[in-house]
Image (cartoon, rainbow, N blue to C red):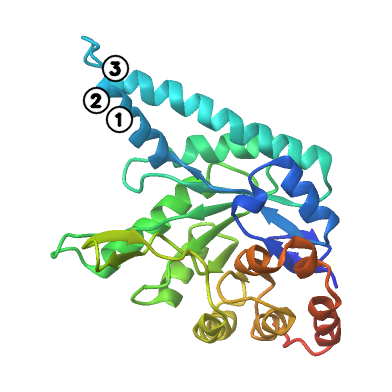
Amino acid sequence: MRAKYLGLDLPSPIIVSSSPYTSNVKSVEQCAASGAGAVVLKSIFEEQILHHAAALDTVSDSAYGDAEVYLQRYLGEDYKAGFLRLVQEARSKTELPVIASINCVVDKGDWIEYATAMADAGASALELNIFIQSTDIHAQARELELNYAEIVGRVAGAVKIPVSVKLPMRLTNVFALSSALLGHGARGVVFFNRFFEPDVDVERMTFVESSPYSEPTELRNVLRMVAICSAVLPQLDLSVSTGVHDGEAAVKALLCGAEAVQVCTAIHREGIRSHCRNERVHRPLVRAAGFRFAR
């Protein structure tokens, strides 16, 4: 079953989402061989560069006041070069659409620099990971969400490839925001992103990392959002990225209006081949192809 997402022709609606399974060329080749329709490469995080540079500057005894700026630039170029090589090699060694994933510092990040570099390297499309967690009690929801649209407008105006946005789960009005993103040049949105969620170790009385993986029960809320969004904003291409653990879940997402689904947890638990090429996954997809709701 073929699909079309962000204007790209996909051999399958199953996309391997940004994860360790798309972090190197060998893994991308395995995704292609296993029947994936596209890959979203592991995200490039500007914040990692800034954090690493700040840590090195702290332990450095350099007398130069701009040492941290130099470290940011040096580390940033080296870090970015690795991702650009991955884009180039993934495109040259497979026929899959390759979507580059970018996560920059929200207010002053180098969104355009990273986006144009990925586009020039040959990325088929971009997926922007934007997350604004304000602690300002005076900040209004509308003001915060418009920051998403501003970032998208800047990026979409700087590149010629399709731009999508991976949205966080908790938004005041996901449909109003999606409409604003569309108006600023976004071609699609992804429901939803998963960010670091802490847990508490009651024995040690400290914060610890919780499981980064989704559960099948999370799909229900996503289906509701996708169904409504596909009805009120049919111009947007939609992808489901939470709770898709088997072929039936993928069919549900497609029937609700998604163009594609993104999988990671299912691959982690069952393996890339068992999920992307398994008949239990593809048979319901093929069966549902003739019954998909008209957009």
Q: Amino acid at mark 3?
A: Ala
Q: Is residue 96 above or below residue 203?
A: above
Report the residue at 68% width, 64% height from top.
267
Residue 159 locus on image (x, y percent): 59, 43
Q: Nearer the viewer, residue 56 or 78?
A: 56
Q: How far apart are labels 1 and 2 at the CA level?
A: 5 Å
User: Which one is earlier in the sequence, the residue at label 1 or at label 3?
Assistant: 1
Q: Is residue 231 left or right of residue 61?
A: right
Q: Amino acid at mark 2?
A: Thr
Q: How far apart are labels 2 and 3 at the CA level?
A: 10 Å
Q: Is residue 91 left or right of residue 241?
A: right
Residue 120 locus on image (x, y percent): 65, 34
Q: Amino acid at mark 1?
A: Ala
The tag on residue 5 is none
Of the residues tagged 2 and 3, which is closer to the observer?
Answer: 2
Label 3 Cα neighbours within 10 Å, binned few <14 / some 14-19 / many ≥20 = some
Quadrant into which the C terminus falls: bottom right
Q: Quadrant of residue 187?
A: bottom right
Report the residue at 27% width, 63% height from top.
143
Residues tagged 1 and 2 counted as in contact (Cβ below 8 A): yes
Label 1 Cα neighbours within 10 Å, binned few <14 / some 14-19 / many ≥20 = few
Q: Is residue 133 visible?
A: no
Q: Nearer the viewer, residue 134 or 248?
A: 248
Quadrant into which the N terminus falls: bottom right
Q: Which residue is mark 2?
A: 58
The tag on residue 67 is 3
